[in-house]
Image (spheres, rainbow, N blue to C red):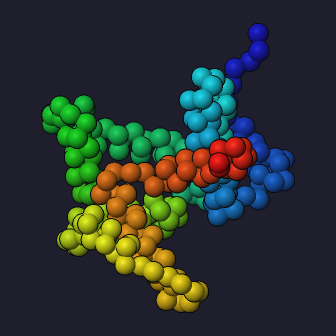
Amino acid sequence: MTKRYSYEDLLEIIRTLRGENGCPWDKVQTHESLKPCMMEEAAELLASIRIYDQTGNPENMCEELGDVLLQVVMHAQIASEEGLFTMEDVIDAVSRKMVRRHPHVFGANNADTPEEALTNWEEIKKEEKKDKSWIDSPLREIPRELPALTRAAKVLKKIDKYYESGSTYEQDVEALAACKPETYSKELEQIVADMLLRLSDIARITKISQEQVLTDRIEDLIEQYERPELLN
């Protein structure tokens, strides 16, 4: 029978790869150097979910989940070598967070609907963030590493919540209609940026996932040009 590796085996494999007689590439990796790897593996996991939806075959998704887990374990191993925290600390922290943010499951609070559960989550998350020294304002909770369209929608939502911007769908549509760019200039850059923000606000207000609809539209465009008969 083929050996099945366990979670503990994986931790030991990564320790070995990072050890004195380990892999020359793995040994020199850092949190910073692995950032592109995490981005790539996350994208490949999303692709695997799409492939599963299209084919019903979960094999690729299983593999890509493993690759994302590998990145988590690598970062935890590096942190352990730096004396910061261990994989066990990571698991303990996320387990505590899940219990803490689900009082309607593990505590006395009630939440009969998904909306109530989400409200619980957001209120507890807000309380947790209060004493974090690296967060200067509610807007800084949103990582700048997010894709710009996703970040824009989240920032606009926070602005609407904490700063009472008063932005409306109608105002956004009117602002887009008023934009009539003609030639390149620094002013045009600002207009384009404002247009993208306005579109992000419309997407936020109407609960449209910008990244997803743009991805789908790009795929439609590619298919149209791959099949010229669709352009007629």
Front in this rendered view, residue 159 or 13: 159
Q: Is residue 159 above or below residue 126?
A: below
**Residue 16: in sight, yes or no?**
yes
Residue 114 as seen in the image, left or right of residue 154: left
Residue 143 percent coordinates (x, y): 46, 64
Front in this rendered view, residue 112 or 189: 189
Q: Which residue is rendered at x = 42% and y = 43% of the image?
A: 94
Q: Which residue is rendered at x = 69% and y = 20% of the image?
A: 4
Residue 2 as seen in the image, left or right of residue 216: right
| Residue 35 position by quadrant | bottom right
Q: Is residue 104 above or below residue 29?
A: above
Front in this rendered view, residue 171 or 18: 171
Residue found at the very far top of the displayed protein: 1
| Residue 173 position by quadrant | bottom left
**Residue 135: in sight, yes or no?**
no
Residue 29 percent coordinates (x, y): 73, 58
Q: Which residue is rendered at x = 82% and y = 47% of the image?
A: 22
| Residue 156 position by quadrant | bottom left
Residue 27 percent coordinates (x, y): 77, 54
Q: Is residue 182 above or below residue 6?
A: below
Q: Which residue is rendered at x = 38% and y = 69% of the image?
A: 198
